[in-house]
Image (cartoon, grey):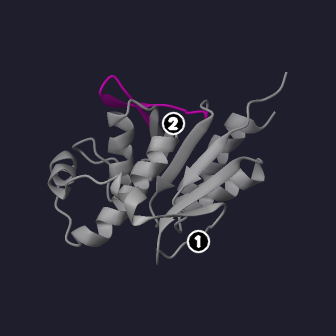
Amino acid sequence: MTQVKKHFFSGGLKGAEAAFGEQAEKYGIVETTYAFEGQTLSREMNLEILSEETLRKGDVSMEIVSARMGRRYAQADKIRKVFQVLFHMVNKGCQVFAIGWIQDDNTVKGGTGWAVELGKFFNRPVSVFDQEKSQWYTWKENRWALDTPVITQTTFCGTGTRNLSDQGKAAIEELFKRSFAS
């Protein structure tokens, strides 16, 4: 039986995205990195610089983002492009993995939270490793449930904090090992 080839989508930023990419490479998974012109990246595997026109396809009102996330963003123009890249990652990835911190309002801290919210909105399986609790959670029945996720979809994306802890890095390594080591 032939294993279906997997495809990983990322933003190539330092921290969690770079660690996800390193594991994808280790396991022979095709990786595509989305970015915008002028963005500083840690990984550039199959780099696709998204044009202004393509970025706009992932545009959403910052008022909607602020309302959904329950917070305001000071540098709206800069964060808008990051959110647009996240849209393209989640749109291509049928499963979403993130490393960060789940907050009391069930959102995830920082820009990572927008990828998680998009994953929920698109009805994708979404799993977050909470670095404070050192535990994976998956969004099920409108709440976070403790879980030990596995990569099951043909396409998936990984994102998260730039401040990746040793536990977060180990969680990514264990996720790939659980999913692909035979």
Q: Which numbered marker is on residue 150?
A: none
> Of all residues shown, which one is farthest toward the right?
1
Task: State which quarter of the image contains the N terminus.
Answer: top right
The quarter of the picture where residue 4 lies is top right
x, y percent for residue 178: 68, 36
x, y percent for residue 113: 34, 51
Tell me how many marks there are: 2
Q: Which residue is mark 1?
A: 42
Tell me the kind of residue under disc 1: Ser
Front one among 172 and 38: 38
Would residue 45 appear left or right of 157 to someone viewing this image? right
Would residue 77 appear left or right of 7 to someone viewing this image? left
Identify the residue at horizontal 68%, vertical 39% (top origin). 6
Query: Label 2 vs label 1: CA separation?
Result: 22 Å
43 lies above or below 124: below
Q: Secondary structure at mark 2?
A: loop
15 lies above or below 100: below
Q: Earlier in the sequence, mark 2 or mark 1?
A: 1
Q: Residues within 10 Å of mark 2 (few under 14, many from 20)?
A: many
x, y percent for residue 64: 17, 49
Task: State which quarter of the image contains the C terminus.
Answer: top right
Q: Which residue is mark 2?
A: 95
Residue 71 visible in the current orientation:
yes
23 lies above or below 79: above
